[in-house]
Image (cartoon, coloured by chain):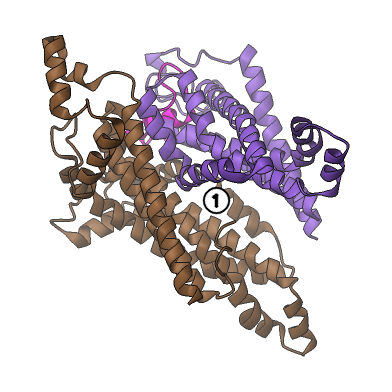
Chain colours: A brown, B purple
């Protein structure tokens, strides 16, 4: 019963947050300086024409009514037309979204597979009181901006070792294997600093458990250090990491925007950068809502999964 | 063992940050070359005694440009953190201290904004407001408000029920006075470490925006843009390597500082 309530509460909060994002995205569009009607008419501007166009576009309606219309159109897939490409925004996004999703997915896989064992290993070293060099190295890796890392990777693996051809993008519709192979260096670039982050978080979370009472109890019962580590600390230490991974998804999204630029990958991020440069607002609006929705929905599922892994989280304790 | 370990970090952090800080200050008065001066006969010179970091495609001195870029990034990050922490503290203080509906509403909006990477929010705002150094600083300042507000709200909430605050209320201090002369001084160490973390993020966001071509605009030199320009002529690796490494050092110095301060404080 309690868990059903928890899920309902979470769903309500999910819907509210998504609505809030849509409100923000809508008002962002409203507060831009400059009247879009004036710029659409250009030299043909007259008072009457502007008035007629406003009527036609529905700009004369009250703002909440326009918001509802906009929301309805947006949800049903009508996101307006790009100012620059003169194409429906929905088509542009449908074309680019898979690229960014693949990029994010492969990066996340690398992060999960590598960082957690790495963090556990760091914690084990800490437990044994071993050296600190590796942690400073980890800190150093975390400090490398992804575009710098990307350029270095292209230089070393592309230009010197010739393991891949920089800039020769393969379209996913033509050759999915080639496409994924092309993405690999980019995903590594996105993943590396996040791997360091998650590994550090995992380590800290586990080290915190080392001082817990149940560890002392286990020790006094005569359990071996390895057993304490694997049976007691590991389970308790890894649960917070799941929530942290949910947050990393947002970081991976941001990282992919930059890395797409470095590796010349035509995904959502590149489209966004170009659109920001041209102030092509319909595209920016749509991409932002997409990315936000993705991050929020992933975190929603993380919360639900967390609830089942750690039943101690009850209603009302979800936040903070 | 642990204390010693964080002390090493602190020392390294201080050294790195100080060296960069001194470089920035000196650069106001002296640079070996004009960072924007082009000299076509000198292009793509490898690093030498004359040009420490070599020269780029227009024969500009990479060292001077790197220092100039460091200065830009440094100043942008500094003002960003000042704006963000000032307003963030105010918002956090009011919401954390008074609570209630205002708190709920502001923090909901805050949560949504904070769940976005700061880069994305900054990009949207650049798109709305346009570019320019002053606008960039303002935009980044605003983008960094939510994270400061959240941290400070937590501190104010935690402290407002402590006995010394109750006593202050009992002797009739005004809310304003309680907030800023009783609670605020107790939040300083938390504020300082979030300033260091914020500075760090600001460096990263500024560099990323400039790399994407929507941050600092020419003719100002910027570390991020130097990298994106240098991507066109890869084989002259010094044009990429030195600005990049300076950026790494800047971030690393800040992380080490904030991290070690927090750890040493806690134990």
The spot of residue A70 in percent (x, y) is 24, 39
In depth, the one of A13 and B221 nearer the eye is: A13
Asked if residue A168 can be seen in this view, the reply is no
Residue at the far bottom: name it.
Answer: A222
In depth, the one of A141 and A96 nearer the eye is: A96
- Side of A52 where B210 appears, left or right: right
Residue drawn at point x = 38 percent, y = 58 percent: A297
The spot of residue A213 in percent (x, y) is 76, 76
* Count of all numbered marks drawn on residues in the image: 1
The spot of residue A146 in percent (x, y) is 45, 45
Examine the rendered structure and indicate whether residue B138 appears above or below residue A128.
above
Name which quarter of the figure residue A68 lies in: top left
Name which quarter of the figure residue A184 lies in: bottom left
The spot of residue A311 in percent (x, y) is 55, 76
Chain of the residue on which disc 1 is drawn: A
In depth, the one of B216 and A43 nearer the eye is: A43
Residue behind mark 1: A141
In depth, the one of A150 and B263 nearer the eye is: B263
- Side of B255 where B125 appears, left or right: left
- Side of B156 where A138 appears, left or right: left
Asked if residue A209 can be seen in this view, the reply is yes
User: Magenta part of the protein: which range?
Assistant: B210-237
Q: Per the image, is B218 magenta?
A: yes
Residue drawn at point x = 72 percent, y = 72 percent: A210
Dot 1, how many residues are within 10 Å of its Cα: few (below 14), some (14-19), or many (20+)?
some
- Which element type, helix, strand or loop, lies under badge 1? helix
Q: Per the image, is B203 magenta?
A: no
Residue drawn at point x = 69 percent, y = 24 percent: B22
Of the 4 image quadrants, the one containing the C terminus of chain A is: bottom right
């Amino acid at each position: 019963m309690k868990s059903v309530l928890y899920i309902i509460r979470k769903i309500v909060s999910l819907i509210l947050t998504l609505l809030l994002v849509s409100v923000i995205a809508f008002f962002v569009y409203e507060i831009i300086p400059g009247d879009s009607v004036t710029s659409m008419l250009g030299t043909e501007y007259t008072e009457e024409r502007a008035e007629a166009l406003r009527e036609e576009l529905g700009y004369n309606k009250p703002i909440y009514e326009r918001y509802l219309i906009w929301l309805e159109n947006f949800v049903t897939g009508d996101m307006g037309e790009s100012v620059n490409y003169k194409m429906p925004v929905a088509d542009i996004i449908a074309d680019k979204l898979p690229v960014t999703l693949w990029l994010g997915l492969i990066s996340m896989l690398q992060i999960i597979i590598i960082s957690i064992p790495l963090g556990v290993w760091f914690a084990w070293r800490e437990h044994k009181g071993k050296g600190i060099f590796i942690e400073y190295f980890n800190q150093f890796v975390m400090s490398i901006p992804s575009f710098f890392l990307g350029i270095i990777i292209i230089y070393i693996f592309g230009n010197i070792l010739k393991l891949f051809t920089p800039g020769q993008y393969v379209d996913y519709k033509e050759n999915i294997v080639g496409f994924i192979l092309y993405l690999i260096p980019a995903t590594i670039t996105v993943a590396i600093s996040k791997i360091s982050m998650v590994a550090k978080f995992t380590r800290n979370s586990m080290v915190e458990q080392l001082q817990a009472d149940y560890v002392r109890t286990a020790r006094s019962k005569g359990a071996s250090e390895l057993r304490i580590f694997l049976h007691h600390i590991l389970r308790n230490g890894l649960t917070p990491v799941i929530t942290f991974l949910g947050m990393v998804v947002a970081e991976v999204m941001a990282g992919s925007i930059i890395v797409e630029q470095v590796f010349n990958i035509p995904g959502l991020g590149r489209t966004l950068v170009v659109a920001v440069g041209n102030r092509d607002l319909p595209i920016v609006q749509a991409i932002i809502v997409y990315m936000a929705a993705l991050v929020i929905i992933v975190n929603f599922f993380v919360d639900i999964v967390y609830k089942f892994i750690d039943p101690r989280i009850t209603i009302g304790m979800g936040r903070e | 063992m642990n204390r010693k370990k964080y002390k090493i970090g602190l020392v390294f952090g201080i050294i790195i940050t100080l060296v960069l800080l001194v470089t920035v200050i000196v650069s106001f008065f002296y640079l070996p070359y004009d960072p924007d001066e082009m000299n076509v006969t000198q292009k793509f010179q490898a690093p030498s005694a004359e040009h420490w970091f070599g020269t780029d495609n227009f024969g500009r001195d990479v060292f001077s440009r790197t220092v100039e870029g460091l200065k830009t990034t440094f100043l942008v990050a500094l003002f960003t953190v000042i704006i963000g922490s000032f307003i963030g503290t105010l918002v956090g203080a009011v919401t954390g201290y008074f609570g209630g509906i205002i708190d709920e509403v502001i923090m909901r909006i805050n949560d949504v904004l904070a769940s976005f990477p700061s880069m994305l929010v900054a990009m949207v705002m650049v798109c709305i407001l346009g570019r320019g150094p002053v606008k960039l600083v303002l935009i980044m300042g605003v983008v960094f408000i939510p994270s400061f507000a959240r941290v400070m709200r937590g501190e104010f909430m935690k402290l407002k029920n402590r006995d010394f605050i109750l006593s202050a209320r009992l002797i009739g201090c005004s809310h304003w006075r309680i907030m800023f002369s009783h609670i605020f001084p107790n939040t300083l160490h938390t504020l300082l470490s979030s300033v260091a973390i914020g500075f760090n993020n600001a460096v990263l966001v500024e560099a990323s925006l400039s790399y994407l071509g929507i941050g600092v605009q020419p003719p100002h030199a910027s570390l991020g843009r130097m990298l994106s320009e240098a991507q066109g002529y890869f084989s002259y690796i010094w044009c990429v390597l030195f600005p990049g490494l300076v950026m790494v050092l800047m971030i690393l110095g800040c992380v080490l500082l904030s991290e070690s301060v927090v750890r040493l404080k806690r134990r």
